[in-house]
């Protein structure tokens, strides 16, 4: 008869082990002042994983539209109707195109189209609401 083989116990590496909560909770550190008081998007917003995931999805659609030679108006309509505010705010930054290139290198080959879409969409966001129905 064969003896059953017993697997040795393996401990989790320290980097993966869950931290042990202290028995006595120390007071939470005071909230720090927002270095970006106007709540404007900054470079750190781009590294927010949720923003990056959203940007990748929307950029993939825009690049597909560019590859299919869709009109700038179609691209602008998509941006105006679909993009969440935080991504529209990123479009208004001076380094907006570098941010797109960080997310997708394919953006480089469609820079002219993306720039026209951006400019057209931002103009629509800045226009009075009465003009939006047209």
Image: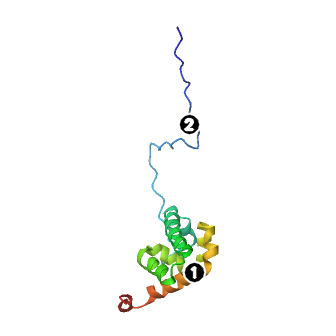
Q: Distance between the residues labelled 2 and 1?
A: 50 Å
Residue under pointer 2: 12
Pick whichever of labels 2 and 1 is earlier in the sequence.
Answer: 2
Decide if residue 102 is on the left or right side of residue 124: right
| Other residues around mark 1 within 10 Å, as few (<14) / some (14–19) / many (≥20) | many
- Identify the residue shown where x is 54% and y is 24%: 7
Q: Where is residue 15 in the image (x, y as percent from the top left)?
A: 58, 44
Which of 37/101 is in front? Answer: 101
Helix, strand, or loop for circle 1? Answer: helix
Which of 61/124 is in front? Answer: 61
Decide if residue 56 is on the left or right side of residue 85: right
Decide if residue 109 is on the left or right side of residue 130: right
Q: Considering only vertical position in the picture, is 28 above or below 14?
A: below
Question: Which disc is residue 113 wearing?
Answer: 1
Residue farthest along the top direction in this orientation: 1
- Identify the residue shown where x is 51% and y is 15%: 4
Helix, strand, or loop for circle 2? Answer: loop
* Picture quadrant where residue 83 is located: bottom left
Q: Considering only vertical position in the picture, is 106 above or below 6?
A: below
């Amino acid at each position: 008869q064969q003896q059953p083989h017993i697997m040795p116990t393996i401990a989790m590496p320290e980097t993966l082990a869950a931290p042990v909560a202290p028995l006595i909770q120390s007071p939470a550190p005071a909230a720090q002042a927002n270095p970006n008081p106007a709540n404007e998007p900054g470079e750190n917003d781009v590294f927010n994983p949720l923003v990056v995931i959203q940007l990748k999805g929307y950029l993939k659609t825009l690049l597909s539209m560019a590859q299919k030679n869709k009109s700038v108006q179609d691209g602008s309509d998509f941006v105006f109707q679909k993009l969440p505010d935080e991504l529209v705010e990123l479009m208004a930054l001076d380094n907006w195109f570098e941010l797109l290139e960080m997310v997708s290198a394919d953006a480089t080959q469609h820079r002219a189209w993306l720039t026209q879409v951006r400019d057209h969409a931002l103009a629509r966001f800045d226009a009075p609401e009465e003009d939006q129905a047209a």
